Image (cartoon, grey):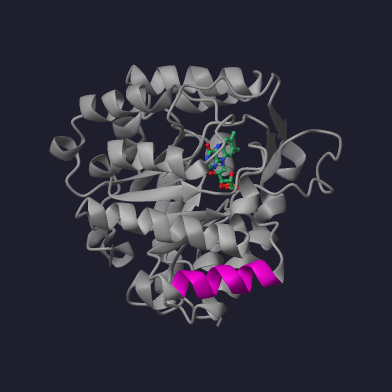
Amino acid sequence: MYNLAHRILKKLDPELSHNISIKALKLGIYPKIICKNTEILEQTIWGRTFKTPIGLSAGFDKNAEVINPILNLGFSFTELGTVTPLPQKGNSKPRIHRFPAQKALINSLGFNNKGMDVFERNINNSNLKENFQDKIIGINIGNNKDTVEILDDLKKLFDRLYRLGDYIVINLSSPNTPGLRDNLKSQNFEKIVTNIHRLRDENNSKIPILFKISPDISDQDKKDISLISLANDVDGLILTNTTINKSMVNDKLEGGVSGRPLFLKSNELIRDFYTLTSGKIKIIGVGGIFDANDILTKMKLGASLIQIYSSFTYEGPYHVKKMTYDLINLIQQQGFRSISEVIGQYS
Ligand SMILES: Cc1cc2nc3c(=O)[nH]c(=O)nc-3n(C[C@H](O)[C@H](O)[C@H](O)COP(=O)(O)O)c2cc1C
């Protein structure tokens, strides 16, 4: 039944189908999936136990509406957001396009979300800690489009939300918010890192803070970001957001490409950052993962955890369970005793 529903959803307009999926998840209309005997995939990172390395990446649950359902589908962690301080409509529609032959999406959403008040309320209403002791949520924050000083927005968001998640992500890499990616240039990046770390200290918090990076940065940017991250003990980097290189899909559309065409590019960044930081900064690998082999590739290049978005929309509700068991089989076949042994094998 759920597979049939998913096949129908894939024929509808992508944003409509997303909205229907969110409604169905909220109403409990989805298969409850329990992944058992996954000890070989377990890791402790930032003092938290990740049952498997597979998480949902930001953008699917922008308003923190379906935390429990997503965790019930077999994800070990879910990244909520991107949330901005004020509600925001985003760019004009249509703004999500499917390219099934290329297993790709192009989106130009532009941080459409209901703002941090609704976001906070939704998390508080989800009884997360009671239901899921061992499941983990990340909170991905970003600035409103019209904001002049990004640090003002990040401060508002951090102060309000840092107690509610297991890690915070500063999104500096959406291609759909004008000027956002300029914050990955060394001086801007350093200013944001030091300010956000100061905020954390002022609040006596130890919450891990990660930065989400664009795949379209230069080699010099990679070096600068690595040095600044090492010097400031950054907790982690998320590699990567969507790419503006649309040559493999459709050059004429606005927005960023996700899915298969992003796979090699995001792998390149994982490899480069793992090398440049000597494996000292945790990496969450994301971009074009469709199966367990893809997960293994990203982890061997240096990712400790991975996330998916596009393949979840293409493959449906049983996708995470299948990848979880395929991953267990794969690492056992290759003689690993634990998933953590895989990380950085290729370096
Ligand atoms: C429709 C859509 C919306 C997205 N929204 C966000 C977002 O709000 N914040 C963010 O950090 N990344 C966002 N992303 C990027 C994803 O989190 C992910 O980095 C990217 O899609 C690559 O992963 P994938 O190839 O598995 O889709 C979005 C992606 C898509 C397809």
Secondary structure of the magenta portion, mostly?
Answer: helix
Of the pair 313 and 116, the residue shown nearer to us: 116
Question: Over which residues does the magenta segment extend?
Answer: 220-230
| 219 sits left or right of 61 in the view | right
Extreme residue toward the left, this view? 130
Q: Residue at left 47%, top 69%?
A: 229
Quarter of the image for the N terminus: give it: top left
Image coordinates of residue 138 in percent, x first then y, are: 36, 46
| Quadrant containing the C terminus in the rendered view | bottom right
Position of residue 256 measured from the top left corner of the image (x, y, whole percent): 70, 41
Q: Compared to 32, does 187 lie above or below?
A: below
Q: Where is residue 47 in the image (x, y as percent from the top left)?
A: 22, 63
Q: Which residue is drawn at 32% across and 39% down?
A: 71
- Res 132 → quadrant: top left
Identify whether 103 is placed above or below 341: above
Q: In which quarter of the image is ligand 1?
A: top right
In this rendering, the answer to whether 251 lies above or below 340 is above
Residue at 41%, 80% (x, y): give it: 335
Where is residue 330 drawn, in percent x and y? 46, 67
Residue 58 relative to residue 197: left or right? right
Q: Is residue 227 magenta?
A: yes
